Amino acid sequence: MTKERDKLSMSPEEVRTLCRNGSLTGPTSGFAKGRVQANMMIVPREHAFDFLLFCQRNPKPCPLVEVLEPGQFAPRCAEGGDVRTDLPGYRVFENGRLIREVGDIGEYWRDDLVTFLIGCSFSFESALIEGGIPLRHVDAGKNVAMYKTNIPCWSAGQFNGNMVVSMRPVKSGHVARAVEISGRFPQVHGAPVHIGHPGLIGITDLSSPDFGDAIPIFDDELPVFWACGVTPQYVAELSRIPFCISHSPGKMLVTDLTTS
């Protein structure tokens, strides 16, 4: 419990420093209570307008926190931060194929790269916990479970694909409360997009997530699904643009912004 409280009480700057020096390489769920965490997608300037349009057309999985100028790496939402080093992990794609997972992206940086920071549901997890809704992946120190779905996104230019969702088991009697609490945070995905019946959204096996860790569901619980910021990297992968960089699933930029 002391370790968990230490994670919650860390400042965003402390978390970013741990990422920068390589001390934090795992998921950021449970860190820096009350701060907005952000997914990240970096695309070349030539694809930036279409990607911006994709985010604007799909605000549920892609709620924009900030868009940086081409070549800029210091976000306004994280004073002193650097998007090239301040996340626990990154994914590098070429022509839609994952070629490397790395701890920093300095060697890949170019002056034409445009960074998009997108709200993450980790941001409202402390509010759920305070509202009496325990989160098993947080208690176990695991990543949240994430799944590809059959829920279509509105395409924009070359970017086309379906939504990715994160799943958290919630006791049946607490589902309405979970919806109410998370709905207060539209800038970080807001209320769930689906509750129960995973097959209806194209998920065939909850024990085999496409990203993150498998989280067991008990008899008195329902799987609750939130739109997920892994959607943009999945869509970019399907779109097979020549080059892009994303965060590794579950490994976010912890910003200075407060969820309140």
Image (cartoon, grey):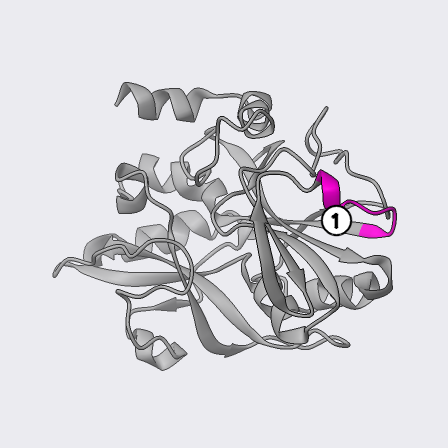
Q: Is residue 6 magenta?
A: no
**Residue situated in front as seen by the camera: 237 or 76:** 237
**Which residue bears the numbered disc 1?**
115
**Residue situated in front as seen by the camera: 70 or 12:** 70
Q: Tell me the kind of residue under disc 1.
A: Thr
Kindly indicate the quadrant of the structure image that contains residue 131: top left
Q: In the displayed image of the protein, which residue is found farthest to the left?
A: 219
**Residue situated in front as seen by the camera: 66 or 48:** 48
Q: Quadrant of the C terminus?
A: top right
Q: Which residue is painted at 48% across and 36% down in the image? A: 25
For residue 22, side relative to residue 67 (left or right): left
Q: Is residue 239 above or below residue 170?
A: below
Across and down, in percent, residue 196 comes to: 29, 69
For residue 118, side relative to residue 89 (left or right): right
For residue 21, side relative to residue 67 (left or right): left
Whether residue 103 is visible here, answered yes or no, is: yes
Across and down, in percent, residue 213 comes to: 33, 53
Q: Is residue 108 magenta?
A: yes
Across and down, in percent, residue 246 comes to: 63, 53
Whether residue 260 is visible here, answered yes or no, is: no
Magenta part of the chain? 106-113
SS of the residue at dot 1?
Answer: strand
How many labels were placed on the picture?
Answer: 1
Q: Is residue 148 above or below residue 168?
A: below
Q: Which residue is painted at 38% across and 47% down in the image? A: 143
